[in-house]
Structures are given as C-alpha cells and as structure tokens.
Image (cartoon, helix red, strand yellow):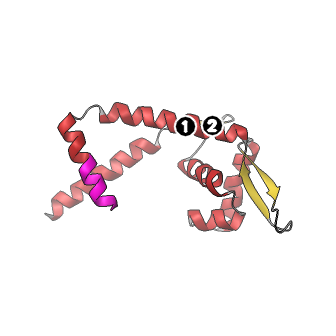
Amino acid sequence: MSSRVDHIISLIFATRKMMHEQKESCRGRNCSFLHLISLGYIQQKSPLMKEIADFLGVAPPSATSLVGTLIKSELVHREADADDRRNVRIVISKKGEKFLEGHKENMAEKMRKNLSKLSATEQQQLEKILEKISA
C-alpha cells in the first residue's frame, strides 16, 4: 500500500510540475507560478502588500519584489486605500485582467488536451476521485 501511495504522490508532483511549466510572458520575462497566483489573488482582493505576503507565505520583501515585477509589467498598480490613505492597495490593471484571462484559457486548453488522453470512464473516475479528495 505504501509504495502505491508513494507512486501516486510522485505522479501528482509530476503532473503539477508539467502544469506549472506552462509560462506566459510578462513583458519579455517569464511569469512564475507565484506571479500568476499572486495576480489572481490581487484580482480577487485588491490586497495590501502584507496580505499578499501572508497569502503566499513569504517575507514582505519577497512579496514586494514579486509585485514589483508585476508593476513593471503593467499588470498591477498601487492605489491609495479609500478608508486609510496611509495604506496602499495593489490593484490589477486592465492589461493584467486580459493577461490573466488569456492565461486561464491557455491553461484550460492544455488541461483539456491532457485530459482527452483519458477515456470517458477514466475521466468520470478522475472526477469522482478529485471530488472526494477536495471534499
């Protein structure tokens, strides 16, 4: 049983690696998975820098560096908080929204291609397994 679970774990990591190797250009640079996750979080929350650091589980200087890349790429911008102008929120730009939407569609298409390798029965089994794991 243990070797089967270990094999499943290694397959999950290999699949994750394959999916994360799909990168989009950030103004001549590669966007890392952290950039994309951060951009999605920023789109949802318009967070403070500390909230981004906490979400990613990184030190504030690391979050600042990561967000700096997104700012240079014009995917996000800084904006004074409406309630407390001393706080600065990170807000996604129109360019960032288009970039993120394009990336999501690109990733979905790649996932469709990979999942099409499975039969209909295998897809149903995978769906049930993922639902069970995520519940």
Q: Main secondary structure of the magenta part?
A: helix
Q: Which residue is mark 1?
A: 103
State the image coordinates of residue 107 (x, y, percent, origin top left). Answer: 47, 37
Q: Quadrant of the N terminus?
A: bottom left
- What is the secondary structure assignment of the residue under circle 1? helix
Q: Quadrant of residue 118?
A: top left
Q: Quadrant of residue 61?
A: bottom right
Span shown in magenta = 127-135
State the CA–CA distance, disc 1 to disc 2.
6 Å
- What is the secondary structure assignment of the residue under circle 2? helix
State the image coordinates of residue 37 (x, y, percent, origin top left). Answer: 56, 52
The answer to whether 10 is drawn above or below residue 81 in the figure is: above
Relative side of 32 to 127, left or right: right
**Can I make out residue 100 in this image?**
yes
Front residue (pair 45, 36): 45
Q: Which residue is mark 2?
A: 99
Q: Residue at x 73, y 56 (%)?
A: 90
Q: Quadrant of the C terminus?
A: bottom left
Q: Residue at x 70, y 53 (%)?
A: 67
Say whether marks 1 and 2 touch (CB < 8 Å): yes
Q: Amino acid at mark 1?
A: His
Q: Residue at x 39, y 48 (%)?
A: 16
Front residue (pair 38, 60): 38
State the image coordinates of residue 27 (x, y, percent, origin top left). Answer: 69, 35
Q: How many marks?
A: 2
